[in-house]
Amino acid sequence: MFNIFRKKPKETKLFYHTDVHCHLLPGVDHGSPDVDTSLELLALQQEMGIDHIIATSHVTKATFENTPETLRPAHEKLCRAVAEKGMNMKIDLSAEYRIDEFSLAQFKENRFLPYPGNYLLLENAFQQEILGMDELIYELQLKNFYPILAHPERYDYYGRHRERYTQLHNAGVLFQINLLSFTGYFGGRAKDTAQWLLEHDCIDFLGSDMHNRQHAEIIMDFIGSKDYNRIADRLRSRLMNDTEFAS
């Protein structure tokens, strides 16, 4: 008898291979605390089909005042450990820049770490949009940087006034959405806004925003679900994670 009703095996891999937002450098923010944890989390990334990450540690006034001088040694240490383990994982160094006085000073001094290809991951304040947002975006673009707004679905002030998403996206700001937001990890409002951005073709990158093992396990459980498959079908032909900028 033909087993025509056998269930299709659950998908276990992401439909892209580059994670553009994660906190896996050891000991520089509230992500991975040490090299052993970083290696464990990278192994989980590999299980999900990721073979290239862009390490985006926090750069935030008073909390994580990272600079190229603090991030490069952590990056080199992790790359050495990955090589010693024989892991097939490429690690590029960048950062997630909270738009505040500390980061703006680094921008003025050209002491910052963009993605390959001059893409720059920016984090807005969570209470309200920073003053001069449009001017900052314009200035960065004049200097041939491509601004990426980290997890815009998590900024409630945008979620309540969604026309602002359209304004920013039309102005050339790229949007990186957290895959965790689609799981409901950040709450119902962020999930609903992420769905809206998906439906309006405003998602350019997906990121794990992985800080710990719990984040990895939630994403792994989500892969292959109906919601995940719908996201993959919608974004497969337009997502920029694996484009040449990240090579």
Image: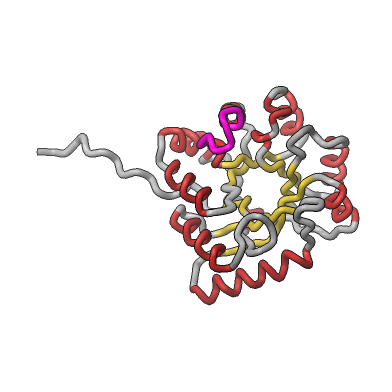
Give the image quarter of residue 116: bottom right
Which residue is at a point 59% across and 52% down the rendered structure image? 211
Task: Residue 5: give x, y in percent of width and height.
Answer: 21, 35
Quarter of the rendering occupied by the N terminus: top left
Closest to the observer, 41 or 55: 41
User: Taking 156 as reference, is 105 left or right?
Assistant: right
31 to 229, vertically: above or below: below
| Residue 185 within the segment the image draws in magenta | yes
Closest to the observer, 2 or 159: 159
159 to 31, vertically: above or below: above
Task: Residue 12: give x, y in percent of width and height.
Answer: 40, 48
Task: Residue 77: give x, y in percent of width and height.
Answer: 64, 72
Residue 117 showing in the rendered view: no
Residue 189 showing in the rendered view: yes
What's the magenta region? 183-190
Which residue is at a point 51% across and 40% down the rendered structure image? 236
